Image (spheres, rainbow, N blue to C red):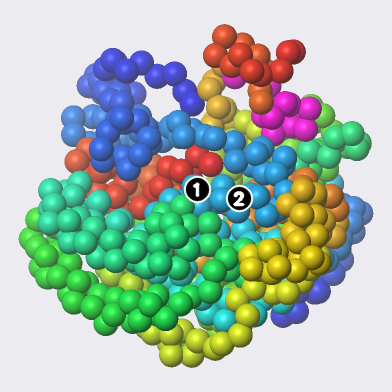
């Protein structure tokens, strides 16, 4: 973090005699979606430079990971991108599973996809709602919270917690889905297209929304690729990259969905891509509910995976395994793996270096919000100061994930 | 194109500059000499067949007490060809490495993060400074000899004695 003066200072950067003004934006500002700080260099209302200062929420999870065993790191991951905790859980456990090569039962894979897509919808709702709120349209956020509440209730039904889900386990998931969850989930996906139609009705033809979003914060496909933008932000610039289709994990290769694409790379495209993606997510969830097989929800690999709760109480062997896994942790083979999946914000990657002991030697998280924010400067340069808020909102940064 | 060809191709082109290659769980890795990192990265990006246009991540790993102590790890992905590659460089303490910012713009922040956490300096980086920690922070938190609780000071009474 840099020590800029909070007071307004001037410097003649262009040499024209007109002084540029340095304006500090954040970290305590409702439109920065957390504790993001942007140091703006302004000439009149025009932004000459927008330097992001991050790190106000740095908790050092990568350092923490080096002293926890593999199972006990899972709860830390849903505190990264707390808008879509399920995806974060998933990226981590799947990286570990890649390392230990455990076969995940099919039912667990379907449940994982359902939860990951639900959290994608929850994340996108909040992104659009907050973006609209920043630009003065409060209703979308309120409608969004109404619908997001249903998803959080679903999460509570399946794992007992609403945001910090801690649902994924190495080798499967923590609880099986009961009939009530499946029924309510169906009710939600039957209802939600109506909610989406309401957002679209409020925004798609809203003249102020279009003026504030269209041709604002544009980024070309080439720049977006070079800057490593991810997820909807990348696809809004016309780069066709979605790991669910390109590098299918879980059961995504058996599901039928489309990857929405736009070319302009402006704020409006990033918004509309999110709307379309939510529709695709609904399609994915419906297929998963239809195809959901029975069977186990966690692998029975006593060396690596936690035994089911009931068995721990009744079966001596399971109790011993449970004790071993909790006290010593599981010991994966030596080696290093990288696994990346398509989180709501882009590629969420997890790089694990294992030295064969119960704790990771190094765990690196490639957080999409961090990389997405890097392009803020390019998007804001030359635009107006009022657009900075629109651009930040359309990038959908979550500071928990950015700062790790 | 099968992934096996990538490492072969790099080995053929750069010969002695490739120190080691290995594959684990489908992840192809090449370990290269630090002098050649820029040349190899430019080749990886510009070669029509490889086309690694997307830099996912740059990170450091500390292997204390092994010598050389550090590794800088680059994760690459090609959007068109859909293949991945991990490039690693081994570095001793206080050794510097060339920055790849002018090859992939993403490298800017992730190299700053690596510098912040490990103290590895990237030569040619436009603005190498700490990104997460304060500017006046002492030490590099992710090094293995840095205590998890931090050092004891006026704000941190439970930290370790220096």
> Image height check: is B13 above or below A178?
above
Look at 53% across and 22% down and name the residue there: B134
Would residue B157 be found to the left or right of residue A36 on screen?
right
> Image height check: is B53 above or below A138?
below
The percent coordinates of residue B29 (x first, y second) are 79, 60
Between A356 and A202, the one lying in front of the other is A356
Instruction: Tell me which label, 2 or 1, sits earlier in the chain.
Output: 1
Q: Residues within 10 Å of mark 2 (few under 14, many from 20)?
A: many
> Image height check: is A53 above or below A304?
above
Is disc 2 in contact with disc 1, using a CB cutoff of under 8 Å?
yes
Q: Which mark, residue A251? A: none
The residue tagged 1 is: A80
Name the dominant secondary structure of the magenta segment: loop
> Image height check: is A262 above or below A140?
below
Asked which secondary structure carries label 1, the reply is: loop
The percent coordinates of residue A389 (x first, y second) are 25, 43
- Residue B4 position by quadrant: bottom right
Residue A301 can be seen, yes or no: yes
Between A241 and A326, the one lying in front of the other is A326
Q: Are marks 2 and 1 on the same chain?
A: yes
The percent coordinates of residue B143 (x first, y second) are 74, 32
- Residue A309 position by quadrant: bottom right
Q: Which mark, residue A365? A: 2
Q: Specify start and end residues of the magenta stretch as a single range.
A: B137-148
Look at 35% across and 61% down and name the residue there: A152
Residue that protrudes farthest toward the front in the picture: A314
Chain of the residue where label 2 is placed in the rendered structure: A
Asked which secondary structure carries label 2, the reply is: strand
Look at 79% across and 65% down and name the residue there: A316
The percent coordinates of residue A216 (x first, y second) are 24, 53
Would residue A122 be found to the left or right of residue B2 on screen?
left
In this rendering, the count of numbered labels is: 2
């Amino acid at each position: 973090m840099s020590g800029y003066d909070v007071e307004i200072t001037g410097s003649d950067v262009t040499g024209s005699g007109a002084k540029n003004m340095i304006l500090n934006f954040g970290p305590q500002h409702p439109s920065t979606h957390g504790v993001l700080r942007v140091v703006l260099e302004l000439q009149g209302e025009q932004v000459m430079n927008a330097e992001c200062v991050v790190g106000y929420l740095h908790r050092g999870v990568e350092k923490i990971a080096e002293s926890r065993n593999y199972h006990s790191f899972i709860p830390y991951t849903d505190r990264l991108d707390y808008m879509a905790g399920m995806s974060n859980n998933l990226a981590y456990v799947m990286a570990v599973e890649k390392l230990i090569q455990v076969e995940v039962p099919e039912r667990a894979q379907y449940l994982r996809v359902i939860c990951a897509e639900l959290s994608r919808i929850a994340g996108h709702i909040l992104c659009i709602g907050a973006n609209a709120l920043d630009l003065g349209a409060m209703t979308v956020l309120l409608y969004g919270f109404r619908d997001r509440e249903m998803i959080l209730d679903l999460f509570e039904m399946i794992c007992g917690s609403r945001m910090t889900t801690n649902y994924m386990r190495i080798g499967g998931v923590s609880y099986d889905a009961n009939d009530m969850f499946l029924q309510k989930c169906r009710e939600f996906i039957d209802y939600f297209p109506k909610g989406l139609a309401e957002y679209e009705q409020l925004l798609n033809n809203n003249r102020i929304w279009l003026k504030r979003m269209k041709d604002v914060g544009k980024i070309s496909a080439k720049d977006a690729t070079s800057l490593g933008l991810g997820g909807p932000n990348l696809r809004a610039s016309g780069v066709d990259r979605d790991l669910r289709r390109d590098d299918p994990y879980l059961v995504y290769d058996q599901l039928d969905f489309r990857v929405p694409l736009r070319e302009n790379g402006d704020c409006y495209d990033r918004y509309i891509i999110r709307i379309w993606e939510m529709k695709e997510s609904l399609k994915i969830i419906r297929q998963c509910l239809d195809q959901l097989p029975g069977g186990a929800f966690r692998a029975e690999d006593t060396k690596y995976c936690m035994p089911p709760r009931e068995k721990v109480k009744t079966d001596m062997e399971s109790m011993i395994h449970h004790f071993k896994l909790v006290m010593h942790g599981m010991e994966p083979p030596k080696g290093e793996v990288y696994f990346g999946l398509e989180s709501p914000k882009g590629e969420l990657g997890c790089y694990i270096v294992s030295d064969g002991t119960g704790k990771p030697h190094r765990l690196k998280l490639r957080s999409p919000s961090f990389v997405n924010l890097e392009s803020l400067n390019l998007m804001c340069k030359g635009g107006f100061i009022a657009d900075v808020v629109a651009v930040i909102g359309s990038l959908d940064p979550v500071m928990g994930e950015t700062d790790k | 194109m099968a992934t096996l060809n990538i490492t072969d191709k790099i080995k053929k082109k750069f010969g002695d500059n490739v120190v080691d290659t290995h594959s684990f769980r489908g992840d192809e890795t090449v370990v290269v000499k630090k002098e050649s990192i820029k040349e190899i990265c430019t080749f990886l990006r510009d070669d029509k067949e490889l086309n690694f246009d997307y830099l996912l991540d740059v990170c450091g790993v500390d292997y204390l007490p092994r010598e050389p102590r550090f590794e800088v790890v680059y994760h690459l992905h090609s959007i068109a060809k859909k293949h991945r590659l991990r490039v690693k460089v081994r570095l001793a303490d206080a050794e510097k490495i060339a920055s790849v910012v002018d090859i992939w713009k993403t490298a800017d922040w992730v190299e700053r993060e690596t510098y912040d956490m490990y103290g590895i300096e990237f030569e040619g980086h436009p603005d190498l400074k700490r990104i997460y920690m304060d500017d006046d922070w002492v030490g590099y938190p992710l090094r293995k000899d840095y205590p998890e609780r931090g050092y004891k000071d006026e704000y941190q009474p439970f930290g370790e004695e220096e």
